[in-house]
Image: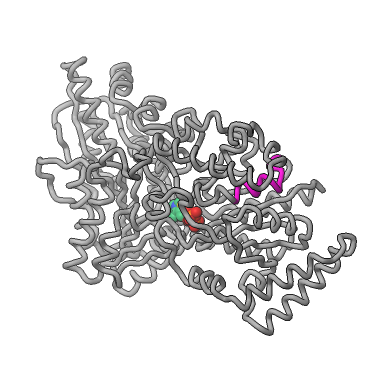
Amino acid sequence: MLESITKPQDIKKLKLAQLIELAADVRKRIIEVTAKNGGHVAPSLGTTDLTVALLKVFNPKTDRIVWDVGHQSYAYKILTERNERFDTLRQFNGISGFNNIHESEYDAFGVGHASTSISAALGIKTARDLQERNGRVVAIIGDGALTSGLSFEGLNNTGHLQPNMIVILNDNNMSISRNVGALQKYLTNILVSHSYNTLKEKIWAFIHRFPSRYRRRLIAMAQKFEENIINSFVPNVIFEDLGFKYVGPVDGHDIGHLITLLNKVKRNMVGPVLIHLVTTKGKGYDFAEDDASKFHGLGPYEIQTGKCVKKSGISYSKVFGDTLCKLARDNSSIVAITAAMSIGTGLDGFAKEFSSRFFDVGIAEGHAVTFAAGLATQGIKPFVAIYSTFLQRSLDQVIHDVALQELPVVFCLDRAGLVGEDGATHHGVFDLSYLSFIPGLILMAPSDANELEAMLAFSATWTAGPIAIRYPRGTARFSDASHPPIEIGKSVITQPHGNVAFLGLGNGYNMAFDVAQKLQESHPDTPIKLVDMRFAKPLDSALLDDLRGTTRIIFTFEENSVLGGFGASICHYFSQDAIPVITFGIPDSFVPHGDMPTLYRSIGFSADALAAKVAEHL
Ligand SMILES: Cc1ncc(C[n+]2csc(CCOP(=O)(O)OP(=O)(O)O)c2C)c(N)n1
């Protein structure tokens, strides 16, 4: 069936049995490709039936379908003229793992970070109303993404503006792990409220009997009537209080029913409608249904066994999680906070061992930071673990709620640097830039796992203000060499003699080391002073002042944008001096998705390329 579909319009002709067959084919395709390339398997399997129904009812070019995060849109990609290229999913120059307006005109809005769909859809719908253009606008949002303040802001404004817009809540009871929060309990309560649902269904059937020429007016009246009746029997659903017509709960895998319902809503819409779908994450693939958390997003796996193909070593996330557990055993004031990423950040062990001192706040990075600030005012020591890219959401909270009040919150920024296949929305290459300018915030980056442990231990005892530690994705390096203890703003000189200085921060230090090795081979007479800077802030001014008289050129290495990061701070430091400073890092452009070696090569951030550049400068 899938082979017969070349464009979404082909779906319009299909009968229900064929649509069901199509959904099965699409699932097979998702599984085959993700087994090779890795990806977000379970979210996309969970929305395959919805996608088929949406494409049967709506026209994805004239209507706008706005996905949230976009990790659940593989079926949509396959059915909107990207099936042939789908084998390239998440590969360099291939199909992105999220929606991207540069990739396809079917993608209404670019995504990767959660909880944007309602706001974006409202913007699209409002623009169309202003321009007097037709077309339906549909936002899809997961129950996990609904925990974010941003989605509430979108709901609030939509309820106020009252556009004819559809929001589909894809409720699978899961975020990456099981969804948490009062709202999830609330949604579950709606699901079990039979009296409410029976009554609603009857009223909907009643509404539908009106002849179409009277429908709009009568529906508005009926809605009011329905609300009044329902209000007297059961408490109102929160979405109705916010100005939406609530429809549901509905089985999100019953394609026939979904089509009938979507058609009904499409024809009868007066103001915003929220359709509450109940779906199973991983639907149709046993391993993914059984362990939706693992299959939320993973690397290549064996289809027959569900086992991951690559065995990974100990990650920096695990080193972080284990070290925090060790520290927390001796210090009862330590607590850990995650924004819906307990496994990804390595905090799952902490959550088990210290359940009362562990807080998963939902996809709510801004709240996580201010919550930590509140805790810190009372003498609690919060460690907030958030991926570098997602902390972008909380910049004001970091500045206004934490730094300005000099609160000793520790930010643990996982996935700092390039992350590979998740691409531009997920690379953590801006944190040094957006944190460097904050007064009083200490900014560190370990060059290996031992340094990460030492930095965490140091942070646990620091009470004078906030600290951020950034560390990369992937397997941790351990070193046998003993490291000098962490001292505030103090670097480590690992190769002392030379009038050419290589200053590396975090992973950047390892790159500096590799480049130095390469240069020793090609330019054995070049004396290099190699420094593991450890701190992006405060900078090691004693070391830098010493370079003034002894160094003829400085090279900096970091896995952050060259604008505003560590290298930029070094340039600023020497702005009154004649010493040239050459900064190596991520260029001022969005780096796409792909495997790490290819990405590094594509931006010229490899030991060979940088050694050649250094040689040129010398
Ligand atoms: C701002 C932000 N924080 C965290 C994430 C990581 N993340 C991706 S998907 C996801 C869970 C989303 O759950 P839900 O919306 O219910 O969708 P589902 O995967 O269950 O279909 C999270 C936490 C993100 N993409 N963006």
Q: Assign the N terminus to one quadrant of the image.
A: top right
User: What x and y, as percent, mark residue 155?
Assistant: 63, 63
Q: Main secondary structure of the magenta part?
A: helix
Q: Which residue is found at the position 41% from the left and 47% from the top?
A: 297
Is 248 displayed left or right of 374 in the figure?
A: right
Q: For this rendering, which residue is in front, 161 or 410?
A: 161
Considering depth in this image, is 15 or 417 the residue closer to the camera?
15
Residue 41 coordinates in the image, percent (x, y) = 45, 45
495 left or right of 359 in image:
left
Residue 136 relative to residue 301: left or right: right
Residue 271 forms part of the magenta stretch: no
* Residue 461 pos. (x, y %): 21, 63
Residue at image coords 82%, 48%: 132
Q: Looking at the image, which residue is at 23% across and 29% down?
A: 501
Report the magenta residues as a range: 50-61
Can residue 393 be seen here? no
